[in-house]
Image (cartoon, rainbow, N blue to C red):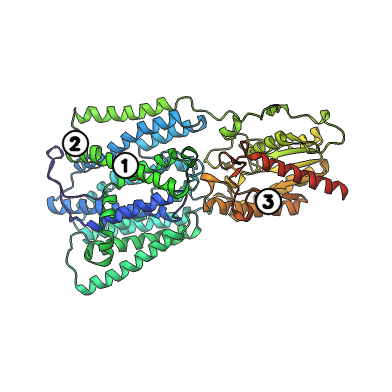
Amino acid sequence: MHERSRPALSALGPARVKIRHVPGLDGLRGLAVLGVLLFHANGLLRGGYLGVDLFFVLSGFLITSLLVEEHRSTGRIELRTFWIRRARRLMPALLALMPAVALHAFFLATPSELTRIRGDAIATLAYVANWRAIVAQQSYWEMFAAPSPLEHTWSLAIEEQFYVVWPLVVAAVLALFRGRVRALMVVCLTLGLASAVAMGLLYEGGNTTRVYLGTDTRGTAILLGAALAASGLAREEASPSRAKMALNAFGILSAVGLAVAWARLDGQSSFLYRGGFWATELAALVVVACTVRAPLGPVARVLSVRPLRWLGEVSYGVYLWHWPLYVVLTEERLNVGGLALLSVRLVATFAVALVSYRFLERPIRERGIPWGRPRLVVPSVCALSLGVVLLATRGGAAPPIAGIAPSIASMAPPKGMPPIDAFLPASALPSNAVRALVLGDSVAISLGIHMYWSRRGGDPYILQRAVGDCSILEDIAPVRSFGGEPHGHGNCAESWVNDVKELHPDVAVVMLGGAFLATAKLEDRWQSVCDPGWHDAYARRLTELLEALAPHVAQRLLVLTPYPVGKWDTPAIREKVDCYTGVLREAARKGGAQTIDLMAHVCPGGVCTLTSDDQPVRLDGLHFGGAGSTEAARWMLAEVRRLTEAGRAH
């Protein structure tokens, strides 16, 4: 995003306009991408996503500085030349990424992921990835749980939309006001304020997708950078010493404030959308101003260190490639975690980005396409890049059992055990047997399967009527799953009463282990589990369902959901589970049911069991699967038996 002074390119018409190169801005861009790298490492830097806002501020400042300087020098803005330069800067690396995404889709992606990857690729190449995610209600904060290799391209889409529209705005304003740059600054500030107001008005509590990804609501950062450029800062090199001292002081304070925000500010915090974003963007603006106007000051000197500057120079390739590599280089595939996993990911990212910069991005940016006519080559390469993705993602479909992770759907029973569909009907059970009916969602299916396979003499007989990809709120309000799509199997509880009437269980075991990931449209806005509206609606509905079961089954047991593990284990998701636990306890209390604290067993003290007998307990991090689930299943059987016998004695 940061332009350096380079020789004129005859293919682009007039000589390129030069603006003063500030090394500290390279370092600032390197710092921004480093924050994103650490945030995407399972939230290692909790507020590292704010690095994207720093990118936005820098883009607005640098691009507007170029446009203003061109108009000042030549009296006009060559729009075609500008757009060609942007295309040379951005498209080669993006087009090179698509074959890699195709390889991932062909060899590694599950059938249920192919459709999304195909749609993401089309939206990415059209630079509308942010709006696709908004329409699909794909929450950015659940990217670790259901990752797409192109999840991160939403920010590139916003920047490209800015590159297309903003030169037209700048040219029109400068023409209308006869080159008066101050008028442009007023326009920038007015539009920036409108964007900030839009974020405040459109914010819907727990559902942040619209305001976080919207071009209109995220424009404040870019427009603030543009206003800074329109103020003439880029052209002024000399400032009074007192002014520099004051600016350095504000720069240091702003840098400290940003450091605190990057370390502590959660991306779903309501504070972020009610002023937090604007505060961090203003702080970033002060740091940019300090770096430009006081290049020998402490802030600029720190940002000018060579490693940060180098990272800034290759930041586009680093940002573009890091997330697809993170998706491929997982703990499960590499059998390493923690610092070792992060090191492997960073080394791979830097290596690929360096090759891309040295042999693809820089040559094309400086000399253009070395072969053929651009009018033929560019469309052909675009079509080829998209074509390989479409070819690799053909046949995308739902998992074999809709709504269940592939690791669960394809699970085979242990040797000597009957298959899943061989659950015994109530009529075939001994008259004195404890009959336990498992109800709920796909997590209940996975745990119920292992309870059935793991039972021993005296353990309850397990009957299974759980439903994958569902919600108990389905008939009350519009509901979307964690991937932003409607639930494939509607209402989890549609047949609960009929099931207990038909099967005559002694106890109903209810487990809705994935509900905390869903959003529901309540009170005319999308809400999630920690919002009061979602809490009240879900607790009320679950209470009604538990009460409806009471006349037909002697006992009702509600299972408390444990924290997920692996890619799902993030501070934001843990907060959701904590909120959900409160909902479950309230419903159990009001509905007269008992609870089974699976959370305390699987995650004692908040530290979740990852393996049992050296085998994973939850293969995909959420559903119970594999040999390691046997211990948890046996514990559940013992709890069901204990509580049932205690209820009979009472």
Instruction: Classify residue 439 by image quadrant.
Output: top right
Question: Disc 2 marks which amino acid?
Answer: Gly
Mark sitting on residue 351: 1
Question: Disc 1 marks which amino acid?
Answer: Ala
Looking at the picture, tell me which residue is in the foreground, 638 or 31. 638
Mark sitting on residue 368: 2
Residue 222 seen anywhere in this rendered image of the structure:
no
Whole-Å distance between the Cαs marked 3 and 1? Answer: 48 Å
Looking at the image, residue 211 sits to the left or right of residue 583; the answer is left
Query: Is 43 located above or below residue 253 in the figure?
Result: above
Question: Disc 3 marks which amino acid?
Answer: Leu
What residue is pinned by disc 3?
584
SS category of the residue bearing label 2: loop
SS category of the residue bearing label 3: helix
SS category of the residue bearing label 1: helix
Query: Is 429 located above or below residue 291 in the figure?
Result: above
Whole-Å distance between the Cαs marked 2 and 1? Answer: 23 Å
Mark sitting on residue 131: none
Looking at the image, residue 179 sits to the left or right of residue 309; the answer is left
**Which numbered mark, 2 or 1, is in the foreground of this view?**
1
Looking at the picture, tell me which residue is in the foreground, 76 or 59. 59
Crowd tier of the residue under label 2, counting other residues whose Cα lies within 10 Å: few below 14, some 14–19, many 20 or above? some
